[in-house]
Amino acid sequence: KQEVTQIPAALSVPEGENLVLNCSFTDSAIYNLQWFRQDPGKGLTSLLLIQSSQREQTSGRLNASLDKSSGRSTLYIAASQPGDSATYLCAVSSNTGKLIFGQGTTLQVKP
Amino acid sequence: NAGVMQNPRHLVRRRGQEARLRCSPMKGHSHVYWYRQLPEEGLKFMVYLQKENIIDESGMPKERFSAEFPKEGPSILRIQQVVRGDSAAYFCASSHGLAGRTDTQYFGPGTRLTVL
């Protein structure tokens, strides 16, 4: 059974700092991995999707990497801003397309 | 291009009543997924539907819950005889399905169900 774990559960950093969020999964037979952002009381916004054949994806200040063999992904946020404060969710896609989510990392960027 | 739409955004029901949650996928999308987020818990998959077909319902509770995605109209998640433990945020996601299982899923804003 696939399990997704995110560490740390919460993170507080000063504005401008670079940071890394971690995601690990137990079954390497995934189709893709997505990183999402969720603001309090809101829906999910897709940030990056990495196909199983890819190693990384970049969008603006965000960079996500994938190492299938070790069951790990990282989300790197450069030059963090207060507007980046949110919960970041990692999810892997199973063979039926359903997403299996981690518990999330709640990020607070202090001005 | 409108995103995934869900309604109502907030729904209050008394124990024993029925809850009907609606999801309109993005234009051109024929795949719909329902997820539930219980308080202080992560998102859990419930069901995956394509037009008129249930593909994977492995996350659906065995009783009281049902889902459909008819040929015309939105996808409906129906909860009969609601109990307090059904209080949660219910999210719908859609994908176009052309790339199969590797498609990006786009999420709606969710329906927050409160059972009194």
Image: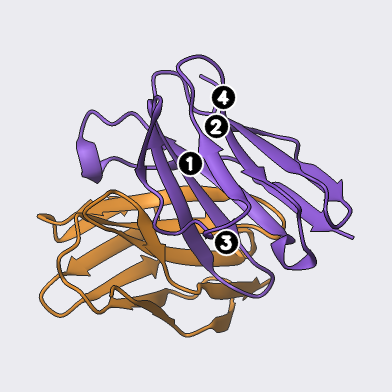
Chain colours: A orange, B purple
Q: Secondary structure at mark 3?
A: helix
The residue indicated by pointer 3 is A84
Residue type at tag 4 = Pro
Which mark identifies residue B4?
2
Residue A59 shows in this picture:
no
Which mark identifies residue B15?
none
The residue indicated by pointer 1 is B93
Closest to the observer, B8 or A56 = B8
Residue B89 in the image, given as x and y percentages of width and height? 67, 55
Answer yes or no: are tags 4 and 3 on the same subunit. no
Q: Nearer the viewer, mark 2 or mark 4?
A: 4
Answer yes or no: are tags 1 and 2 on the same subunit. yes
Residue type at tag 3 = Asp
Answer yes or no: are tags 2 and 3 on the same subunit. no
Q: Is residue B96 above or below residue A64?
A: above
Q: CA–CA distance between discs 1 and 2?
A: 7 Å
Answer yes or no: are tags 2 and 4 on the same subunit. yes
Residue type at tag 2 = Val
Asked whether the beta carbons under mark 1 and mark 4 sit within 8 Å of each other, the answer is no
Answer yes or no: are tags 1 and 3 on the same subunit. no
**Quarter of the image where one finds residue A54:** bottom left
Name the residue furthest front.
B63
Q: Nearer the viewer, mark 4 or mark 3?
A: 4
Asked whether the beta carbons under mark 1 and mark 2 sit within 8 Å of each other, the answer is yes
Q: Secondary structure at mark 4?
A: loop
Which mark identifies residue B74?
4
Q: Residues within 10 Å of mark 2 (few under 14, many from 20)?
A: many
Relative placement, left or right, of B26 versus A70 is right
In the rendered structure, which disc, 1 or 4, sits on the residue that comes first in sequence?
4
Asked whether the beta carbons under mark 1 and mark 3 sit within 8 Å of each other, the answer is no
Residue B90 in the image, given as x and y percentages of width and height? 63, 51
Q: Is residue A109 above or below residue B91?
A: below
